[in-house]
Structures are given as C-alpha cells and as structure tokens.
Image (spheres, rainbow, N blue to C red):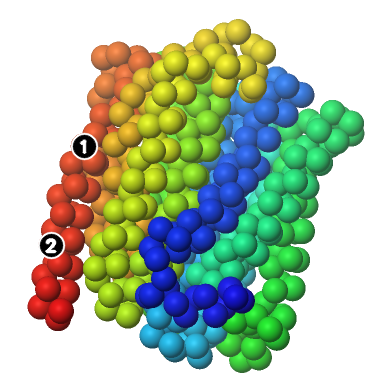
C-alpha cells in the first residue's frame, strides 16, 4: 500500500503497528543524526586532540540556537500538517509546507549573518579559553556558512514524516550520515584539515540530504509537494506555525543557555579538560535522547491525526505505548553508564585524564535518566495535540526552574561534582511536574470519549 494511502488510516489501524511503522524510520533517522554528531567527536578526538573536543563542546550553544529556529518552523509546520491531514484539508497542509520553506530561508540567513559577525565574543562568553577558541572558531565558521541548508533540510525532513513518508525521511538522514562518516576521516586524516575538515564534511553531507528531499517535493506523485504560490507568506500562517513550534524553540533556546552555564561552570571549577569531558558525555547522552525523540516523532503524526479526528481513546493509547518504549531506552542508557562507561568513553579519546573525568561525570549525569522518558514524551505529546502552552511550561520547568538554579548553587559547594549532580536533580523534579500534567490531560480525554461514546 502506498505510504500516502496509509496516512489516511491513522485513526483505524492497530496502534502498535502504526507506532512502530512511523517510529522505526524516525528512530533510525534520529540515531543516524546522533551518529552524525558522534562521528565528529570520535574523529576529532583521535585525529586532533583533547582541546579540540573541548572547543567542539563550546559550539553546542550556537548549534542549539540554530536548531531552535529550525524547530520553530519545522516542528510547527509538521504538527500543523498532521492535524490538517487528519481533517482532510490538503490545501492548507501544502500552504504550510511552502510557507515553512520560505520562513526557514529567511530566519537561516539572518541567523548566519548575526552569528558570524559576533562569533568570537560569543565563544568567549560561552567559556572559550585561548587554547579552545581557535578550534571552536574554525568549526563554526564552516557550519554557519551552511546554516540555511541545515534549516531547510531539517524542516523538510520533519514535514516528510508528518505527511506519511517516514521511510524516505529515514533514507535522507542515513545518506547524510554515510557521507559524513566517509568524509570525516578523509578530510581530517587524509587532507590534514583538522576540525575544519569535520565541519566541511557535515555541510556537504547535509547538501546531499537536501537534494534528496527536494527531489521528493517536486515529484507529482508525492502526497504533499511544492506548488507555485505556496511559498508566498500567507496571512496568519506564520503565526499558526510559530505558535505550535514555540515549545521546542524555547526548549532549545533554554538548552543553549543551560549549556553556556554548564560550560562556564566546568571551566571555572575544572578547566578545559572538564569542558571536554562534558562535550563527550553530552554527545553520548544525546545518542539515547535521539532514540527517544525517534519514538516521539513516530507518535506525533499519529497523536495529531487522531486528535484532529477526535479519537481520544486512541490518543491515550498512543501516548502510553510511546512512553513505555522511551522508558526502556532510558533504562538501557542508565545501565551502560553505571556498568560499562569505560568501554563507551574509550571510543572518543585516548587521553587518560579526559577519559577519567568523562566516566566520573557520566555516572552522575545518568543516575536519574529513566525518569527523563516521562518528561520528554509528555512535552512532545502536548505539542502534538496543539497544546503548546503546556509543552512550553513543561520544557521550561526542567531547565529554568530546576536546572539553572541547581547549576548556580551546587557547584559552589561541590565543585565539578556539583555541576554534574545538578542534572539528575532537575530530571527528578521535572518528572514530578510531568506526571501531574499528563494525569490531568488523560482524565480530560477519558471524560470526552465516555460522554461521546
């Protein structure tokens, strides 16, 4: 059965079958995207040095801010597209697609120019030292040059999954990962380009993925495709897209602020090596987070479609199954961090000091990780059913209300250990808030389908 026909049966098919059909390609895509980032760290760690890893860690806030603007449009448009498909409103879905491309281009260009102009002051503010600044600068100059490509690529990939083509979205991502893994050692070791070579490999890989996506959206057989006139900004459409995408946007912005505080704290209490340790640990944790995001992305079109179709019982069951799958992933990460951290860290560095600090931090960082699954799934769920205020609130409680104060207080008493310990403390508090919010929402849904039969 063609994928676009299957899309129209999201309110009828067996939920586990639907979730794994949509989630499996998304998980592969998100895992591949994580490998995309891990490849850079591994090759830079082995092909350059420990300070280069620390420099790469300092670029995370800029990368997250870029991702924030990308998700503002990409996630907002994909959620709107899912709901409109559930309502059989194909015209509005295609307008949302076209407007998303235009908005991503505009925002991407503005961000690129601003970041390049203020790059050095920003990196210093993020915690760069004289040893790490050159590496961070070299990497970001190339990444920012390809920023518009990144925005459009990720946005179109989100929309591809939302319109019923999860396998094609997966193929585009896997293609980018394969090219990046091939080019990284060639540019870093073969051409001796160092950290700059990793950045060039990343941009070229995303160019290939974008070409694949553009080919899909210009194909007349695709369910949603580019049409003349849909790229012109329509009245009210940016607001509709941004209102839904505001939750992941704020989450990424706050995440950038948190990473800045973390990097500055690590540098203050542990120096460049502590910053590098966090860079490795953060990429490792992101690998499992991305798998969980994959389940969330598989959930989003299903929850959005069934919410639009007023199939509330199915919406609840979709949430529960997604939560169970994400919880299993978080438990696996916890086990690896506590029992086998040496083997995992050895992939990234041969530097004994950096490895030791990373192992110590990783164990603390993931001690409460199984609780993260509820917070993540609940936030994505509220976003999927067009309740952005709750999604935003949940995202902000974890990072603003709990994590930032912890980062400002604990390191003063416990040093580097206090920086690491702030993360599980905030994860636990966010779990409690998420449990309260989702319990109330499920009760509302149950009341709805009991009244309406």
Residue at 54% in and 66% down: 161
Residue at 68% in and 51% down: 174
Q: Which residue is identified by label 1?
A: 429
Q: Residue furthest top?
A: 352
Indicate which label's residue lies in the foreground, 2 or 1.
2
Question: How far separated are the C-alphas under marks 2 and 1?
Answer: 22 Å
Task: Say if residue 11 shows up in the picture.
Answer: yes
Closer to us: 383 or 295 = 295
- From the viewer's perspective, is 98 left or right of 212? left
Q: Residue 146 at what x, y percent from top left?
A: 70, 55
- From the viewer's perspective, is 53 left or right of 322? right
Disc with the residue nearer the chain's start (2 vs 1): 1
Within 10 angstroms of label 1, few (less than 14), some, or many (20 or more) residues? some
Task: Tell me: residue 1, above or below residue 228.
Answer: above
Q: Residue 10 at what x, y percent from top left?
A: 42, 73
Q: Residue 317 at what x, y percent from top left?
A: 29, 60
Q: Which residue is identified by label 2?
A: 443
Q: How many marks?
A: 2
Residue at 29% in and 67% down: 314
Closer to us: 416 or 85 = 85
Question: Which element carries disc 1, helix, strand or loop?
Answer: helix
Task: Tell me: residue 431, above or below residue 16.
Answer: above
């Amino acid at each position: 059965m063609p994928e676009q026909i299957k899309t129209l049966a999201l309110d009828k098919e067996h939920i586990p079958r639907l979730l794994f059909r949509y989630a499996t390609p998304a998980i592969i895509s998100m895992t591949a995207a994580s490998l995309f980032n891990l490849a850079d760290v591994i090759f830079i760690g082995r092909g350059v040095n420990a300070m280069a890893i620390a420099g790469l860690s300092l670029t995370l806030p800029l990368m997250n801010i870029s991702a924030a603007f990308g998700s503002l449009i990409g996630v907002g448009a994909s959620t709107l597209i899912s709901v409109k498909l559930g309502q059989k409103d194909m015209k509005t879905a295609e307008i949302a697609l076209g407007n998303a491309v235009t908005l991503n281009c505009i925002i991407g260009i503005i961000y690129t120019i601003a970041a390049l102009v203020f790059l050095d002051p920003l990196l210093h503010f993020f915690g760069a030292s004289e040893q790490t600044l050159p590496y961070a600068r070299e990497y970001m100059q190339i990444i920012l040059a390809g920023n518009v490509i990144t925005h459009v690529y990720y946005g179109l990939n989100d929309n591809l999954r939302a319109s019923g083509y999860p396998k094609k979205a997966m193929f585009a991502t896997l293609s980018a990962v394969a090219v990046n893994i091939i080019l990284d050692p060639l540019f870093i070791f073969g051409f001796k380009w160092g950290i700059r070579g990793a950045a060039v490999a990343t941009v070229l890989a995303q160019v290939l993925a974008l070409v694949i996506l553009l080919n899909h959206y210009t194909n007349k057989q695709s369910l949603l495709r580019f049409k003349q006139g849909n790229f012109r900004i329509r009245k009210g459409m940016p607001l509709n897209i941004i209102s839904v995408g505001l939750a992941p946007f704020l989450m990424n912005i706050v995440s950038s602020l948190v990473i800045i505080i973390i990097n500055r704290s690590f540098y203050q209490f542990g120096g460049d090596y502590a910053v590098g340790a966090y860079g490795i640990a953060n990429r490792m944790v992101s690998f499992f987070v991305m798998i969980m995001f994959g389940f969330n992305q598989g959930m989003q079109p299903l929850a959005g479609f069934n919410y639009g179709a007023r199939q509330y019982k199915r919406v609840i069951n979709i949430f529960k199954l997604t939560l169970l799958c994400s919880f299993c992933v978080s438990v696996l990460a916890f086990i690896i961090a506590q029992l086998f951290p040496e083997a995992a860290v050895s992939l990234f560095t041969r530097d004994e000091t950096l490895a030791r600090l990373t192992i110590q931090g990783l164990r603390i960082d993931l001690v409460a990780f199984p609780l993260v699954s509820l917070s993540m799934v609940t936030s994505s769920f509220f976003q999927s059913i067009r309740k952005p205020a709750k999604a935003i609130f949940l995202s902000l409680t974890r990072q603003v209300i709990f994590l930032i104060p912890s980062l400002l207080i604990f390191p003063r008493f416990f040093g580097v250990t206090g920086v690491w310990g702030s993360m599980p403390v905030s994860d636990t508090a966010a779990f409690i808030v998420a449990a309260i919010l989702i319990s109330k929402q499920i009760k509302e849904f149950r009341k709805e389908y009991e009244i309406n039969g």
